[in-house]
């Protein structure tokens, strides 16, 4: 069957959408299923959040006592002396903080424990949105068609969830995991990339055992189709990947083999993390990586929450995290956590601190750092909740609250190329907003107290979303 090229298909689809939109009544765009509507708490065409502290995502200092007006899904006014339009719904922001919707750049819709891998088509989108994450990139897919269908359902108002940028299946070398695409030669890379680009994915993710030649083929073919590439790498180092044209790099310090002694071309050294413990962030080696990435405009995704779990007795146990898990998942998680504590690794605590320093040094050098949860490992970093944990961990790395908000919102939007639409609280942008009960500048842990999440101006009740998933993470 003939397929239109992706660019032509998009153009024709755009014409069709405009034509159909002109023929439909305005109310048709606001239709939602009953299963979505039950979570909606703010549904007014015009509303104002008054007397609130705004952290706008640009890195600017917090603004207190501010009013933010939203009309038809767009931010129309921000300031201390803004007039609220007649008939607008008023939301009292006293004692609360308003920030941009979080942009999760490593936010799978699947989840792993130490024993299982589960596609969370139900719980993941609800937890992401409940936690303030209004946009996600799935960054490696176990079930691409499930994600494409979930994205369509959310866009059509049939399902609840964040805006989705879907990543194709992992592409790796011939000895990778069986649920990944295992390449044998560069033509395999081109064929697979071409197929999924035409199916509609937005990004690709290269994995640890891919060769330089295969990665170059993926990047070239993806770019031909207007799709971008990121990577959780090992066999190809960061500097090598940047020179090949990669668009983004995942996990930072934990996956970079630029500094591995004795690394052979296209080889993934098993002991390179032990070598990383001694790295000096001011060294020429590290600074060269930063310059290479910055000069090419390649950002880095921080995923601190998933790696923190391998440090004994971290993170602190939270009742809400355990309550979200199914009983079997909870037992499995606690058992593995206990095993790691008993092993008492001497490497991981120091490696983790080095990773924090690496991310701070990257930003200080001028690098573009974004964030995502990566709900894998052995299950302690849940969708959404792990993003909120990243908010606290980036503070631990030495970033200020306005810097953390920028990393977790506007920087992610920049990497996705949507920063003109979302990612900050600014007039003219889409009202993707998070209203938090408490002062985030005084207590970063207040990020857990999300009250209302606004996606394109529609407010969703965080508490109701969380209640809907309790006891089900690890099942669906």
Image: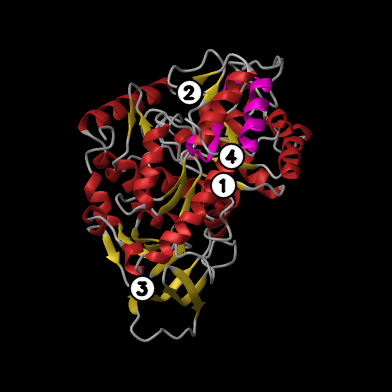
Number of the label disc, if any, that sits on residue 103? none
Q: Is residue 72 above or below residue 208?
A: below
Residue range (magenta): 199-227
- Mark 4 residue element: loop
| Residue for badge 3 | 45
Q: Residue at x 23, y 38 (%)?
A: 472
| Residue for badge 1 | 370
Q: Position of residue 280 (x, y in %)?
A: 70, 34
Q: Is residue 225 magenta?
A: yes
Q: Disc 4 and disc 3: Cα gap in Å? A: 35 Å
Q: Disc 1 and disc 3: Cα gap in Å? A: 32 Å
Q: Disc 1 and disc 4: Cα gap in Å? A: 19 Å
Q: Position of residue 396 (x, y in %)?
A: 52, 47
Q: Position of residue 198 (x, y in %)?
A: 52, 35
Number of marks present in the image shown: 4
Q: Is residue 411 above or below residue 45?
A: above
| Residue for badge 4 | 227
| Residue for badge 2 | 345
């Amino acid at each position: 069957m003939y397929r239109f090229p992706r660019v032509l298909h998009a153009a024709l689809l755009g014409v069709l959408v405009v034509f159909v939109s002109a023929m439909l009544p305005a109310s048709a765009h606001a239709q939602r299923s009953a299963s979505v509507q039950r979570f909606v708490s703010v549904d007014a065409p015009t509303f104002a959040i008054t007397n609130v502290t705004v952290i706008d995502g640009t890195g600017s200092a917090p603004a207190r006592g501010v009013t933010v007006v939203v009309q038809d899904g767009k931010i129309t006014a921000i300031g201390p002396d803004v007039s609220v339009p007649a008939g607008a719904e008023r939301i009292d922001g006293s004692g609360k903080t308003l920030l941009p919707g979080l942009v999760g750049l490593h936010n799978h819709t699947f989840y792993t424990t130490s024993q299982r891998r589960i596609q969370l088509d139900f719980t993941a989108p609800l937890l992401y949105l409940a936690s303030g994450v209004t946009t996600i990139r799935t960054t490696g897919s176990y079930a691409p068609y499930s994600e494409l269908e979930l994205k369509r359902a959310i866009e059509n108002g049939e399902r609840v969830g964040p805006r989705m940028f879907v990543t194709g299946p992992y592409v790796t070398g011939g000895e990778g995991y069986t649920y990944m695409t295992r390449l044998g030669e560069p033509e395999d890379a081109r064929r697979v990339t071409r197929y999924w680009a035409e199916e509609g994915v937005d990004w690709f993710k290269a994995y640890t055992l891919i060769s330089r030649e295969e990665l170059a083929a993926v990047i070239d073919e993806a770019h031909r189709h207007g799709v971008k590439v990121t990577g959780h790498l090992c066999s190809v180092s960061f500097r090598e990947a940047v020179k090949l044209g990669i668009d983004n790099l995942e996990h930072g310090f934990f996956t970079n083999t630029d500094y591995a002694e004795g690394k052979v071309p296209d080889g993934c050294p098993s002991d390179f993390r032990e070598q990383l413990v001694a790295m000096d962030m001011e060294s020429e080696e590290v600074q060269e990586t930063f310059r290479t990435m910055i000069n090419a405009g390649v950002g880095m995704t921080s995923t601190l929450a998933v790696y923190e779990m391998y440090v004994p007795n971290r993170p602190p146990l939270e009742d809400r995290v355990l309550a979200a898990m199914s009983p079997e998942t909870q037992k499995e998680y606690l058992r593995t956590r206990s095993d790691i504590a008993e092993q008492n690794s001497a490497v991981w605590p120091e490696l983790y601190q080095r990773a924090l320093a690496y991310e701070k040094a990257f930003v200080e050098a001028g690098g573009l750092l974004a964030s995502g949860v990566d709900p894998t490992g052995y299950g302690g970093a849940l969708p959404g909740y792990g993003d909120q944990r990243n908010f606290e961990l980036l503070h631990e790395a030495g970033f200020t609250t306005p810097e953390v908000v920028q990393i977790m919102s506007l920087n992610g939007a920049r990497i996705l190329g949507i920063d003109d639409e979302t990612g900050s609280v600014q007039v003219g942008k889409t009202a993707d907003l998070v209203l938090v009960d408490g002062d985030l500048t005084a207590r970063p842990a207040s990020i857990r107290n999300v009250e209302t999440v606004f996606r394109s101006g529609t407010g969703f009740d965080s508490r109701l979303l969380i209640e809907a998933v309790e006891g089900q993470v690890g099942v669906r």
